Image (tube, rainbow, N blue to C red):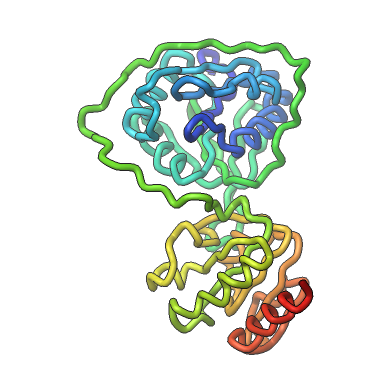
Amino acid sequence: MKDYKGILIYVEQNEGIIHKVSYELINKAKELCKQSNSPLYCLVLGDEGIDVKELNYCGADKVFYMKDGCFENPEEYLFKENIVKFVKEYKPETILIGATNFGRSLAPRIAAALKIGLTADCTDLKMDEDGKVIQVRPAFSNNIFAHIKSKGFPQMATVRYKEFNEAERNEKKDINVSVIEPYVRSYDKVSWIQKFKEENFDITEAEVVVAAGRGIKKAEDLHMLHKLASLLGGEIGASRALVDTGMIGSTHQIGYSGNRVKPKLYIACGISGAPQHIAGMKESEVIVAINSDPSAPIFNIADYGYVGDLYEVIPKMIEKINSSK
């Protein structure tokens, strides 16, 4: 352990914008670093123009900015090669990565290259008396929480988005940014041909989510939910069942194997409430459930429930909202 020091956060960015999960990781890592008297480092891989000093303001003791145009696109192999070489040189005790789509793809590649363990999709992190990070994650369909401790160093985990509050900003903190060169600028086995992007949509940022489940009979019927979500200024979500049938894209999926959301209002339409789905939305501020089955588990966590046919209820909700404008 004496050769390893500090907690390293890989800071994900997209087109120069730092993902909010990084600030959540900083907030939690500060707590762990205080307990173990360890420094907190951040590593950013990106092109010009990233405002990395914000990471210092939020609590990072030192920011390493690997700045180069080769990081314009999020390419896992190139990022992995550079992060692995960085870790071997600087030897952090712990590596934390946000469990985003990119983070979930990147982290296991890093762990495999370093020949270390990886605990994925953690919901909490604790520090024991020996300076080891206890990595907490749900297991067995969210029925228990496993407490995992790595045998060696570095320890590594991915952490779910929106598990922790973002770190508070303090402009009085010293700026400590080290701009470094990439170890590798290209990976010849991968080429970028075209980037596809679903614009203006991120279900995790929605303050209102109208979610569809097995109660929806066919894809065309989703227009009702789209209309309701639009009237409420929200987005449409879905259970895995609808994604698996191809009715809606995976970016809308909410649950253990999808996205985790914490909106102000969550309306579950025809969703029974399987543990895998509840794991992704249970911390919503207000949960409204509409289901024709009075024994559906979703009613156990709902703040408001309506037993009825969503094909009758949703149009009446839309009509009511329209008439009140």
Please name whichever residue, 5 or 185, is drawn nearer the observer in this view of the structure: 185
Q: Is residue 100 left or right of residue 210?
A: left
Residue beneath the point at 45% across and 46% down: 101
Q: Quarter of the image for the C terminus: give it.
A: bottom right
Relative to 192, is 262 above or below?
below
Please tell me which residue lies in front, 155 or 61.
61
Report the residue at 36% width, 47% height from top.
196
Residue at 45% from the left image edge and 78% from the top image edge: 220
Which quadrant of the figure has residue 31?
Answer: top right
Classify 128 as above or below 67: below
Reply above or below: 172 against 241.
above
Residue, x 74% and y 27% (percent of image)?
A: 169
224 or 242: nearer the viewer? 224
- Which x, y percent locates residue 123? 62, 47
Residue 127 percent location from the top left of the image: 67, 32
* Residue 190 lies in quadrant: top left
From the viewer's perspective, is 303 left or right of 11? right
Residue 165: x, y in percent?
A: 71, 41
